[in-house]
Amino acid sequence: MNRVIFIMGVSGSGKSTIGSRLAKVLSTPFFDGDDFHPEANVTKMSNGIPLNDEDRYGWLQTLNKLAKEQLQKNSCVIVCSALKRSYRKILSEGIISNIKWVYLSGSFNQIKERINKRSNHFMSSELLQSQFDTLECPQDAIIIDISLSPEDIVEKIRNEIEVKSEFGLFGLGVIGKSLSRNLAQKGFNISIFNREVKGSEENVAIDFKNTHPELEKSQPFSNIEAFVNSLQTPRRIMLMVNAGKITDMVIDDLIPYLSNGDIIIDGGNSNYLKTKERYDYLKLKNINFIGVGVSGGEEGALKGPSIMPGGNKETYELVRPYLEGIAAKDANGLPCCTYVGEEGSGHFVKMVHNGIEYVEMQLLAEVYDIFKTKGKNPDDIANIFESWKSDVDSYLLGITIDILRKKDGNDWLLNKIVDKAGNKGTGNWTTIATAQLGAPSTLIASALFTRYTSFYKEERLYASENFGITHSELSLNSDDVLNAYQFARIMNHYQGLKLISEAGKAYNWTLNLSEIARIWTNGCIIKSDFVEELIPVLKEDDNILTNQSIISQLKALKPSINKVVVECVLSGLPVVCLSDSVNFLNAYTTSNSSANIIQAQRDYFGAHTYQRTDDPSGDFHHTDWN
């Protein structure tokens, strides 16, 4: 991957000398940014007048254009003071993943002495103070002490850029391996780490590297200190290890070898509350922490996942090129990765993504069960689902079609799979979170508890014999079921997005639900045409049930969901999430509910008080019900 090396620092720090020497060592073109100043800027500085942001804007754009042109052909070295963060943003516009910053750092007196020795240069020592006043030291640069000799400086830079990796991935499980290959395929120089266990897990990183040609330039390690030392500073290390205690153990193992400003990225399925704790813990040690939700499974991790990062915004900018570089792309070619919000918000959004996923899977299972009860075989059901794709296409619908068609000998493989559904905890966490936040994500809880029920296989077999419930004939047609499925999916997405919105308010996270929907349009498990339709809807309101188009859809679909649920209940067929979806809307749209009797009961036995409909003040009342 071609790259632009920007040598930055105040005037007199030696940028031109170091830049030209470095370019020679690297055999790349060299450009001195001062040569591209317009005449008006040079005149102004020669007269001892500092440049302002307006003066610099066009000059910075010119250098950005130069960098882009050079990247089409090769790498290059460009010298530019780039004193402010905003200046560096202009310089890196559109090429952020191709840039390496080198900051030549020195004291005021040290640099003033150098400037006074120079001749025939428009920068005078009187302007030096204004440069130091303007300087915003970069966090994402290779920082070099200018007291070293030019030869040592150039060698140090070359060593950092050519020998040291720019990104480290810790943990080569299924997803870690795929992400490593993805990073390497995108041209990033990476170090990879996996532990070794004598006799069982040996040479994991080395063997993995040797198996895949794209990893030829990667550096494999089984020693933590060597792994950390192989990375450019600030170090960027992504953890792909099991959530929980193992993540904490790995962080503690890394800390002794890290430096101020290094960044740890947790890409596992961590609980968002633990992410907040780790963020605070590492902040005390001057180490940055980003919690990142990654969705897409093994294939997504390799070809492009949906990525949901949360943490400090400035820290995110330091890892943004890598995360956005490996992410899936949406319909407009933009990365399915965006800054979600503060602290644990990235892992929270990923958790809710998984909760929505639980429901989407359960709904397809219930629909499958309806058609199975009607006497359809898996191929028949796959064909029905195939015909639905123009109306409700999604990643999960597509893989379910593949599952239904898979044969094992003369039978369908699905018929041989034991009906016990497992889970890895995120559905549980989502259900706990929705209870803690008081958000009515009933479908997620129902999908989770249905999985729990499925695990009692032996008890279910015994109960089936004892109760003798048989399924009577269903008169439902494919359109009835399709409409009910569409209805339930709308309610599922409403509840999931509502939970995210409530968390944003509770934890003071600045969340953009439209952007969250956008990064769910590719690379993740809940990718669907419907999520894409939600992007403009969520730009108008976080509550999709205020959108007139969605209201009209639900009104049109409701007769079908009513019919499907009634027939299934009368038939003895469990449709937990389908029925929950219509029950929720019935409750949500009831202007005067039965909750008044519940509040009266609470006041009766616990003096919890209540409000009165005939008291506009909103005051609370208590009655002695005896």
Image (spheres, helix red, strand yellow):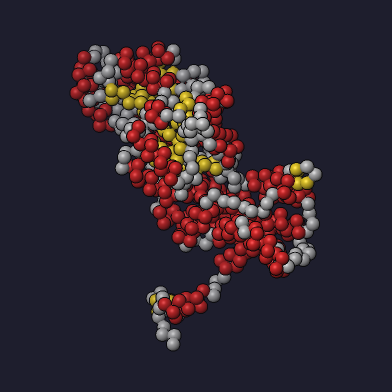
Question: Where, quadrant-wise, is the C terminus in this rendering?
Answer: bottom left
Is residue 596 rendered to the left or right of residue 145? right
Above or below, 302 relative to 592: above
Quarter of the image for residue 466 reads bottom right
Q: Nearer the viewer, residue 432 or 304?
A: 432
Look at 41% across and 83% down and name the residue there: 623
Look at 37% across and 31% down and name the residue there: 234
**Visible in this render: residue 274?**
yes
The picture places residue 35, in percent across and down from the top left corner, at: 36, 17
Look at 41% across and 19% down and name the residue there: 77
The picture places residue 118, in percent across and down from the top left corner, at: 24, 14
**Visible in this render: residue 5?**
no
Quarter of the image for residue 605 reads bottom left
Above or below, 34 relative to 451: above
The picture places residue 372, in percent across and down from the top left corner, at: 75, 56
The picture places residue 323, in percent across and down from the top left corner, at: 48, 36
